[in-house]
Image (cartoon, rainbow, N blue to C red):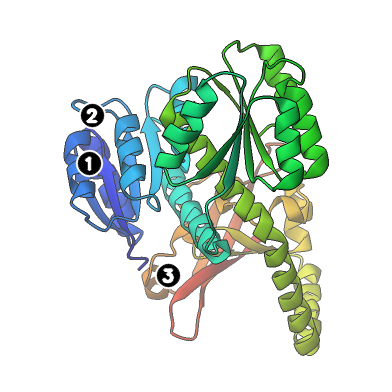
Amino acid sequence: MTGERILVIDDEEVICALLKDTLTDEGYQVETVTNGAEGLEKLMRGEPFDILLTDIRMPKKDGIQVLKEAKNRIPDIITIIMTGYPSIETIRESSEYNAFDYITKPLDPDEVCESIKRSLEVRKLSRELKIPEKPPTILVVDDMQSALFLSEGILQDEGYHAEIAQNGQEALERFKQKHFDVVVADLHMPGMDGIELLNNIKKQDIKTLVIIMTARPSIDSAILAFRHGAYDYITKPIDPDTIINTIQRGWEKHNIETNTDKLLKRLHNMRQQMLDENTSLFKEINWINNVLDASPDLIIATDEYAVIHLVNRTAVQTLGYKKDELVGKPIDKLFEEKKSFFRETEPGTMVKKGNIYNCPLTCITNKGDRIKTMWSGAPLLDKDGKVKGVVGIGRK
């Protein structure tokens, strides 16, 4: 049982019932409500939900409003948007407020479950990487009075330290004297424009986040800004929520990238340690893999989520895939039937059934051909007797 608490908000009761049944079977604690206002009330009361699934089009409060207010109140909550009316505008708004995923209706329960599992893995990794960080120092560059308003009004009210430069040359002088984590620069300025300033800043520190703002947006200038390394391109008049969310997203991305090298080094050291301490184990694994590859039967092993972890040479050759095209992919990729013993990994199901013999399944090759096969399978159990996956042996 995973135990995470999920709140589902959808004005269609049938969707609420479907998701509650599906996610409860997956081990989650699920509550459902049929309008955004009621859902927000639950969140505002401080009920400890880990994940929010919300529809967009709903009476009283729509999903984007729910997403925005939920994130403001509970920044760490995982949010997933569901909609039967997808649009570029709502996709962008969902991304702006850090929704993890955007799923279109009609809902595929498996897709929803996979999205939730991925979101929890990402949050776990993010928490491992996250270290206490002081707020970024920000330089606002603008020849207009809006710079003063932006720095002293919006940013400082949010707890950021912000300074002002009236033009590009002044900004560069300040940058030489003091490091700034984020630079918010106007595109059109006399002397040195925003793109030239962007280039000069990137030469001094490639990791500095530069956000270009303009009252005269164009596709050409937006492409040029991103091509030269701008983090984002926003239009005036400045919307407070937009600039704050842009800086927050950029700073989170910066922190993750800064710590990626540390994580990779740690993983490398752990791998090296495992290699040093388990040489004999790897030899044994290689020997087992050689035995499996020598078998004339198709052999496939999955984990408890029906994701492929092992395929032998016969399976690869028969189905026409490369091994790395299969490992890590859902088992559904290989079979026409969506229900099979490979997916029966809920606690106790495979244990009660025991080994499966002569189960007919239709394999789908890389070219889309169908092959009739007969399979036998058995559960893979951990030391506590819990199902951790399935191994199947198939014959044409």
Residue 350 got which mark? 3
Please tell me which residue lies in front, 293 or 375. Answer: 293
Q: Is 28 situated above or below 380?
A: above
Instruction: Residue 237 in the image: state x and y as whole percent.
Output: 48, 17
Helix, strand or loop status at disc 1: helix
Disc 1 marks which amino acid? Leu
- Report if the CB atoms under discs 2 and 1 are less than 8 Å apart: yes
Helix, strand or loop status at disc 3: helix
Q: Quadrant of the N terminus?
A: bottom left
Q: Residues within 10 Å of mark 2 (few under 14, many from 20)?
A: some
Residue 129 seen: yes
Please tell me which residue lies in front, 211 or 311. Answer: 211
Separation of marks 2 and 3 at Cα, in angstroms: 44 Å
State the residue at coordinates (71%, 23%): 194
Instruction: Residue 173 in the image: state x and y as whole percent.
Output: 75, 37
Foreground label between 3 and 1: 1
Q: Earlier in the sequence, mark 2 or mark 1?
A: 1
Q: Quadrant of residue 284?
A: bottom right
Q: Residue under circle 2?
A: 61
Separation of marks 3 and 1 at Cα, in angstroms: 40 Å
Q: Is 279 situated above or below 30?
A: below
Instruction: Residue 127 in the image: state x and y as whole percent.
Output: 51, 62
Disc 2 marks which amino acid? Lys
Q: Is 393 situated above or below 278?
A: above
From the viewer's perspective, is 273 left or right of 166? right
Q: Residue under circle 1?
A: 40
